[in-house]
Amino acid sequence: PAEDAFYGDADIQAILRLNSCFAQRDSIDLQIMEGLLSGSSYESLAERYFLSVSSVRYRAHKIYADAGAHSKSEFVSKLAYLGRSPLG
């Protein structure tokens, strides 16, 4: 069926996974994601949001995993591939 072809498409699966990832985030995670996308370090994000560096690192790795990425660079690449940032 055509629906199977649509949902079986790798690009569609990537979009759906990112959508699910963003839908699961709280406001702190969204701020961390915005900072990561703008090139901020874990240390600067921790200071900005009054969190420990390990807290920021933990949240970032959860974000990456939920987005199907294994690193910050892979996460950013996935968003760049889609041609836009869902945050702005």
Image (cartoon, grey):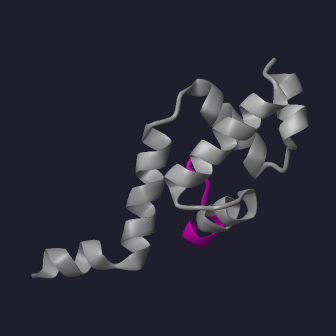
Asked if the stretch drawn in magenta spans residue 11, the answer is: no
Q: Is residue 85 above or below residue 5?
A: above
Relative to residue 15, is residue 46 drawn left or right? right
- Which residues make up the magenta segment? 80-88
Q: Quadrant of residue 56?
A: top right
Residue 65 in the image: state x and y as whole percent.
Answer: 55, 53
Judging depth in this view, the residue of 15 and 57 nearest the camera is 57
Which residue is depicted at the point 50% across and 50% down?
66
Residue 88 in the image: state x and y as whole percent.
Answer: 62, 45
Relative to residue 46, is residue 10 drawn left or right? left
Query: What's the magenta bit mostly, secondary-structure-wise?
Result: loop
Q: Is residue 70 above or below residue 62?
A: below
Relative to residue 44, is residue 59 drawn left or right? left
Which residue is depicted at the point 80% across and 48% down?
38
Residue 63 in the image: state x and y as whole percent.
Answer: 59, 46
Residue 54 in the image: state x and y as whole percent.
Answer: 78, 32
